[in-house]
Image (spheres, rainbow, N blue to C red):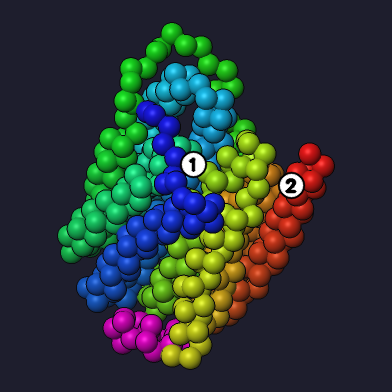
Amino acid sequence: MTLVSGPTASSPWRRLLSNALLVAVAGGFANVLNLGVTFFIARLLQPNTYSAYSQMVGVFFVVALPGSALSVAVVRRATYYIVRGEDDVTRRWEYRLRQRVIRAAAVGALGSLPLAVVIALWLGHRAWIDVWLVILAGIVYAVVSVDRALLQSRQRYSALAGNFVVEGLVRTVFILVGTTFGVAGYGVGLLVAELLTRWHSSWLTRPEEPVDHSISLTHTGLTNELMVAFWTLGMMAILQFIDVFTIGHANPHGGGSYTAISQIAKTLVYAATILSSFLLPEAALANRKGGDVVKQLGVVGGLLAVPALVLTATAALAPTLLVDVFPAQYRHAADSLLTLVVAMVALSVSTVLVTFLLGDGARLPTLWLTACVSVGFFWIVGAHGVWHETATRDLEVQCVVVVGLVVASGFRLRSRLRLEAAA
C-alpha cells in the first residue's frame, strides 16, 4: 500500500476539520441506520424479548470494544514503521499481522463456546447459542478493527468512512431480516453483516505491491500495547453497559423499558467512538513525530458537543420526543432518561480522553479505570435493578471517571507543551 495522507488544505484547522467531518458523517450515517433498526425491533418484539435483544447488543459491544484494543496497538506499531518511511518493511509487517490475527480469531471462536454458556446463565438463563453467535460477530469485528487501524495509521479517512457506511448498510439489511426470527436470528444477521464488512475492509487494505517475505522485522510485537489497550477498553465497555446488564440480571423479563431509554442515551457514546477513529491516529502520529494534538482534541470535542447538547436539552425539555418513538409498553422508565443521558455525556468525554491518552502512549488511564470499575460495579449492582436508582448510581460513577481522566489529560498536555517549549 502507498502512503496516502488526508486532503491538502490551506489551513491545518481546515484539513483536520474536513477529515474529522468525513469520518463523523459516515459514522453518523451508520449510527442513524442502527437507531432505525433499534426502533423497528422495539415494535417487532415483546418487552421481555426486547430485553434479551438489548443484552445481546451489550454482549457484542463488550466483546467488540476490547477488540478495538487491536486498533490502538496496531496504530501505535504501524506509525512506528510509517514515520520511518520504510514501505517495504511496513508491508511485510502488515502481512504478518494479518496472518496472526486470523489464526487468533479462529482459536477465539472455538474457545468462546464455554464462555457463551456461562454468560447466558448469568444474563438470566438466555440461550447459549444466541450469546455465542453474538460473540463470534464481535470476534469478526475485532478483525475488521485491524484493517481499519491500518487505514487510520495511513490517514486514509475516505476509505475508513466508506467502510463505516458499508457496515451500516449491511447491518441494517441482515439484522432486520434476522430479527424477524427472534434473538438467534439477530445473532446470525449480525455475524453475516460483520463478515461482509470484513470482506470490504480487507479489500481496502490489500497490498498494491508484492510483499517481500525475506525482510526481517524488528519491534514487531504488539503484546504490551495490546494488553494495556485491551484492558483499558474492556473497562470502558463495562462502564457503558453495566447498567443494562444489572437490570437484566435483576429482572430478566422486565427490563425492556429501561433498555429502551438506554439505547437513546448510548448513541452519544457511539458518536464518541466514531470520532475516536479520527483522534487515535492523529494522537499516535503526533506522539511519534513530536507534534501536538490540541487542535485534534478541539475539533473532536467541538463535533461531539453538538449532539451532546441537543440530546441533553431534548431530554430535559421535551423527553416525550425521544421516548415516544418506542411503543407505550417501553415508556415506563422515561423519568430516568435525563439522568442516563447526562451519564452518557460524561462517558462520551471519557471515551475521547481515553483514546487520546492511549494514542499518546499513556498508562495511567488503565489504573484509574480499573479502580473506578472495581468499586463502581458493586455500587451500581447495589441498586438491585431499580430503574432510577441504577441510572443515578451510573451517573455518579461516570462523573468520577471523567474527572480523573480530565486531570490525567491535562497533565499529559502540559508536559507535552513544556517539552516543545524547551526544544
| Residue 222 in view, yes or no | no
In the rendered structure, which segment of residues is drawn in magenta?
319-336
Looking at the image, the residue that sits furthest to the top is 214
Q: Quadrant of residue 343?
A: bottom right
Which residue lies under the disc numbered 2? 416
Residue 294 magenta-highlighted: no
Q: Is residue 258 above or below residue 335?
A: above
CA gap between label 2 and label 1 equals: 23 Å
Q: Amino acid at mark 1?
A: Ser
The mark closer to the camera, 2 or 1, is 2
What residue is shown at x 55% (from left), y 23% (from top)?
Answer: 220
What residue is shown at x 23% (from left), y 53% (from top)?
Answer: 170
Q: Is tag 2's residue or tag 1's residue first in the polypeptide sequence? A: 1
x, y percentage for residue 11?
Answer: 52, 53
Viewer-closest of 372 and 361: 361
x, y percentage for residue 165?
Answer: 29, 54
Which residue lies under the disc numbered 1? 71
